[in-house]
């Protein structure tokens, strides 16, 4: 499979992994439909990619927590390019707060973006993906396999995404539609800076050492390669693979190891 001249829809495309995915797809000759709330930034990105790689790119302002915005995003892709080959559900929010201190609006916000955004976009794109035997990708997390302290809403939303994608894959087993869950490890992006605190305000700083993390560009390359190879699941780090398997085999032991790990982060929530 080649991505050249394929129509690719990417949500959360104005920064981080989404922006890196847009550039990687443009390098490979895909036609792009980029969705995010930051419309001016999206327009700048599409103009740059069109000029640099001589591809077609469309910016659509979309808040994926709103069903109507997701429907508009997909409809614009179909009207502009005549169909959709790949949908990458990348838009996401994180959080950092203990549940006992948390405003429940934070959890609802994360579910609306991380889970419902995936559901809405997939619902409207699926008829087109069925026609093209295309791919639906969910950018998930190891937090969707293993709950993390101080991230109850984030882990819950990613567990929900994983369950949704797995159920959909099984429903479509007798079709040629490709469903992939992509789970990066800790990645250098603004997700921790933008993570919601207990009162729903952005933290404004990272709680981890960003320099040792995988780059958004490497994550994008791996996701594109996974789409081409029609991978089922893409867990991108050895630490992530170990965490998934250890959690299945020795969950109580992993509880302790995860507690110890997060007790060492900057300004730890647990001690």
Image (cartoon, grey):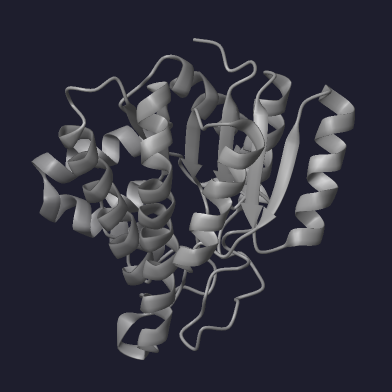
Q: Is residue 103 visible?
A: yes
Left or right: 214 with respect to 28? left
Would you place residue 170 above or below residue 145 in this image?
Answer: above
Would you place residue 172 above or below residue 228 in this image?
Answer: below
- Of residue 234 and residue 117, the one placed in the foreground of this image is 117
Q: Residue at x 49, y 40 (%)?
A: 88
Q: Position of residue 56 (x, y in %)?
A: 76, 30
Would you place residue 3 above or below residue 112 in this image?
Answer: above
Would you place residue 70 above or below residue 29 in this image?
Answer: below
Q: Residue at x 43, y 80 (%)?
A: 106
Q: Residue at x 86, y 41 (%)?
A: 47
Q: How many marks?
A: 0
Location of residue 175 by image quarter: top left
Taking the view exactly as shown, the residue that stands out farthest to the top is 1
Location of residue 9 by image quarter: top right
- Of residue 40 and residue 191, the one placed in the foreground of this image is 40
Quarter of the figure that contains the C terminus: bottom left
Taking the view exactly as shown, the residue that stands out farthest to the right is 51
Left or right: 96 with respect to 108? right
Q: Position of residue 144 (x, y in %)?
A: 30, 51
Q: Position of residue 119 (x, y in %)?
A: 35, 54
Left or right: 149 with respect to 81? left
Q: Is residue 182 visible?
A: no
Q: Residue at x 37, y 62 (%)?
A: 116
- Of residue 93 and residue 22, the one placed in the foreground of this image is 22
Q: Position of residue 246 (x, y in %)?
A: 19, 40
């Amino acid at each position: 499979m080649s991505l050249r001249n394929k129509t690719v829809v990417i949500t959360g495309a104005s920064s981080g992994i989404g922006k890196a995915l847009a550039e990687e797809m443009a390098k490979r000759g895909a036609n792009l439909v980029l969705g995010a709330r930051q419309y001016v930034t999206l327009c700048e990105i599409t103009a740059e990619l069109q000029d640099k790689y001589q591809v077609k790119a469309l910016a659509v302002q979309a808040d994926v927590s709103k069903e109507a915005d997701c429907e508009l995003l997909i409809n614009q892709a179909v009207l502009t390019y005549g169909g959709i080959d790949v949908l990458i559900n990348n838009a996401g929010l994180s959080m950092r707060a203990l549940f006992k201190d948390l405003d429940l609006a934070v959890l609802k916000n994360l579910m609306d973006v991380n889970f419902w955004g995936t559901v809405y976009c997939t619902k409207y794109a699926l008829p087109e993906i069925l026609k093209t035997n295309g791919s639906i990708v969910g950018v998930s997390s190891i937090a969707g396999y293993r709950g993390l302290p101080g991230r109850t809403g984030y882990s819950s939303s990613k567990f929900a995404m994983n369950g949704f994608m797995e159920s959909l894959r099984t429903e479509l087993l007798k079709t040629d539609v490709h469903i992939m869950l992509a789970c990066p490890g800790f990645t250098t992006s603004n997700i921790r800076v933008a993570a919601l605190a207990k009162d729903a305000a952005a933290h404004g700083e990272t709680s981890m050492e960003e320099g040792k993390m995988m780059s958004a560009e490497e994550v994008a390359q791996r996701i594109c390669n996974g789409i081409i190879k029609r991978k089922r699941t893409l867990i991108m780090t050895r630490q992530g693979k170990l965490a998934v398997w250890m959690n299945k085999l020795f969950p109580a032991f992993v509880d302790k190891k995860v507690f110890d790990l997060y007790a060492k982060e900057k300004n730890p929530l647990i001690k």
